[in-house]
């Protein structure tokens, strides 16, 4: 197994009920994505309002509508086990695409927030 590094990419959610999409480029020396984690500067908004679709190298990892709360992790979990394991997902073209959707929820009012995707990546040996 090669060395492991963490990569972080951010999406800004500025309008209620909208989908925000971005394609993130991985470093050329990354061969696999081993895990995925989502965080936010306003966890309650992402937990109640968020869902997404995530693709790596045009391979769907999580389908449209996959709830963000299933990819979040609390502080009571050891830092070594916080990532959703994806196995040895090859990066191929080095692109990670994320489509994040904010949906209305009466439990929390909308305000602009950031969604961060963290990738647990394995480097080429």
Image (tube, rainbow, N blue to C red):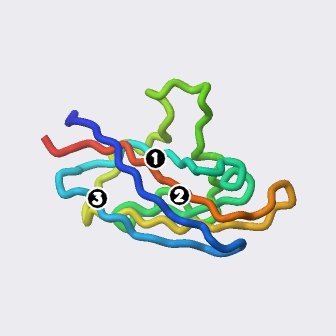
Foreground: disc 2 or disc 1: 1
Quadrant occupied by the C terminus? top left
Q: Is residue 119 left or right of residue 82?
A: left
Q: Looking at this view, is 10 or 81 the one in front? A: 10
Residue 95, by quadrant, is bottom left
Instruction: Please name the residue shown 29% across and 57% down the image.
Output: 91
Q: Find out whether the residues at labels 2 and 1 contact each other: C-beta distance under 8 Å.
A: yes
Within 10 Å of the Cα at label 2, are there few (<14), some (14-19), or many (20+) other Cα atoms?
some
User: Please, what secondary structure does the residue beneath circle 2 have?
Assistant: strand
Instruction: Please name the residue shown 56% across and 58% down the image.
Output: 114
Residue 122 lies, in percent from the top left, at 26, 42
Foreground: disc 2 or disc 3: 3
Query: Mark 2 or mark 1: which comes first in sequence?
Result: 1
User: Please, what secondary structure does the residue beneath circle 1 have?
Assistant: strand
Which residue is under mark 2? 62
Which residue is under mark 3? 26
Residue 62 lies, in percent from the top left, at 53, 57
Q: Looking at this view, is 48 or 14 the one in front? A: 14
Which residue is under mark 1? 36
Instruction: Please name the residue shown 53% across and 49% down the image.
Output: 38
User: Please, what secondary structure does the residue beneath circle 3 have?
Assistant: loop
């Amino acid at each position: 197994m090669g060395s492991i590094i963490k990569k972080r990419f951010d999406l800004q959610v500025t309008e209620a009920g909208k989908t925000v999409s971005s394609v993130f480029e991985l470093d050329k020396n990354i061969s696999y994505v081993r895990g995925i984690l989502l965080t936010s500067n306003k966890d309650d908004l992402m937990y109640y309002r968020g869902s997404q679709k995530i693709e790596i190298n045009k391979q769907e990892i999580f389908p449209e509508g996959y709830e963000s709360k299933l990819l979040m992790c609390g502080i009571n979990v050891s830092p070594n086990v916080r990532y959703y394991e994806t196995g040895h997902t090859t990066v191929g073209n080095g692109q990670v695409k994320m489509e994040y959707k904010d949906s209305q929820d009466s439990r929390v009012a909308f305000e602009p927030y950031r969604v961060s995707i963290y990738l647990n990546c394995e480097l080429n040996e």
